[in-house]
Image (cartoon, rainbow, N blue to C red):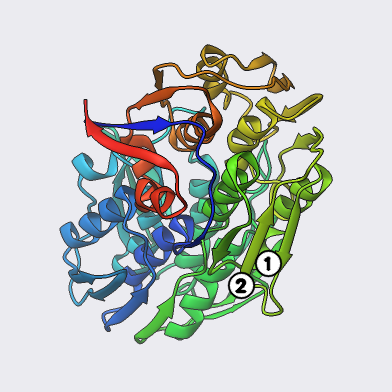
Amino acid sequence: MDKLIVHGGATLRGSVNISGSKNASLPILAASLLTDKEVIIRRVPDVSDTNYMVQIISALGGEIERSSGTVRINNKEIVDTAPYDLVRRMRASICVMGPLLARTGRAVVSLPGGCIIGDRPVDLHLRGLEALGATTEFESGNIIITAPKGGLKGAEVNLRGTHGPTVLGTDNVMMAAVFAEGTTVIESAAAEPEVEDLANFLNALGAKIEGAGTRRIVIQGVTSLGGTEHTVIPDRIEAGTFMAAAVIAGDGVVLRRVCREQMVAINHIFEICGHKLIYNEAGDIVTIHRGENPIGAEIITAPFPGYPTDMQAQMTAVFATTPGISVVKDTIFPQRFMHCAEMKRMGADINVDNGTAIIKGVKQLSSAPVMASDLRASAALVLAALTAKGTTAISRLYHIDRGYEHIDEKLLQLNAHVERVKE
């Protein structure tokens, strides 16, 4: 098991390329199961979550070649049962359910594992698929979903959940509806850029989808799909994380391969706090300058286009050394504050109560051995360590490897003093 050693105090400078989106890559890889023609997907990040998805597709019968961020897939013949030993490792593996059901008429998928940041039920996924005519049963820890003899039928599906729309649920229903007879309308759909990227990929295969990126998606069923080549969108959460690193410890850090349109809510908070973001005309390169007199802010997470829950831990790290009082409220995953206890070990002044963190900025954090508990919490600990006095050891680095491509190498590019070692 690896851990990251961070020697605090280095000034970050230079430029780094943002990887393709992990959260877009996973459903797009799963969607390749819908066609028996070759697909080529570019800028797939080399992270453990995408590695698991590639392994799942291979176990389902897919022929896969992977090289330098490009994945070439041929799913000529596939089976309908996803292997438990792979599915249990990653929550997003649930998104093979829709394409397996659509193509084979049956999907057997274990209830997935992954993060420990709170209950994320699959009932909305199943409700959407059942609206298309599928039947579901549970057996030995597996979800078994079966299409009717005549195939799936288009329907109106409402995916509104307790904490807002479901991204993977929207993905699953959209993929299943590609082959459903007639028209499917998804109301209260997730509007995240990753959902829109999946729809663009499906349309390139020959699907007929309109409205992706809005709360209402309309799918006209088709009978077959072809092949395509597709480039995954930039990872807006990785971009936001490196923006946070830049304002914590940087001096004119440049991020390349970003998408300004997808960063609006994240950009807004940094600007409110007094930091300066300068984009090029195309909106794909941004230079970040730390504000001379930064101030705190209030964040309330919300589905896109609101502030993403996947960025609240990183901003907690920013606020830990920002003068004044800041408030972070997570309405989507109220339990997602396990990083705060570890940051308090580093001297942060944070009080968490009922899904809200109150942060009083301190002048400087100090090093301490800390432990990552989930993907974004681990990123927050790395950020906090960049300016902490002394050397911080972050254990359970496998959490950060789930979603950040070679984060230690990218930080080294920016002049950070970090090293990956075996525990």
In the displayed structure, would residue 29 be above or below residue 35?
above
- For residue 263, say whether it is visible: yes
The crowd level at tag 1 (other Cα within 10 Å; few <14, some 14-19, many 20+) is some
Disc 2: CA contacts within 10 A as few (<14), some (14-19) or many (>=20): some
Residue sitting at x 76%, y 48%: 275
Identify the disc placed on residue 284.
Answer: 2
Displayed quadrant of residue 192: bottom right
Q: Is residue 393 left or right of residue 63?
A: right
Label 1 close to label 2 by CB (< 8 Å) = yes
User: Tag 2 or tag 1, which sits nearer the N-term?
Assistant: 1
Q: In the image, residue 398 lies at what x, y percent?
A: 31, 36
User: Mark 1: which secondary structure?
Assistant: helix
Say the numbered circle drawn on residue 260.
Answer: 1
- Left-right relation of 176 to 79: right
Q: Residue 130 bears which disc, if any?
A: none
Q: Amino acid at mark 1?
A: Arg
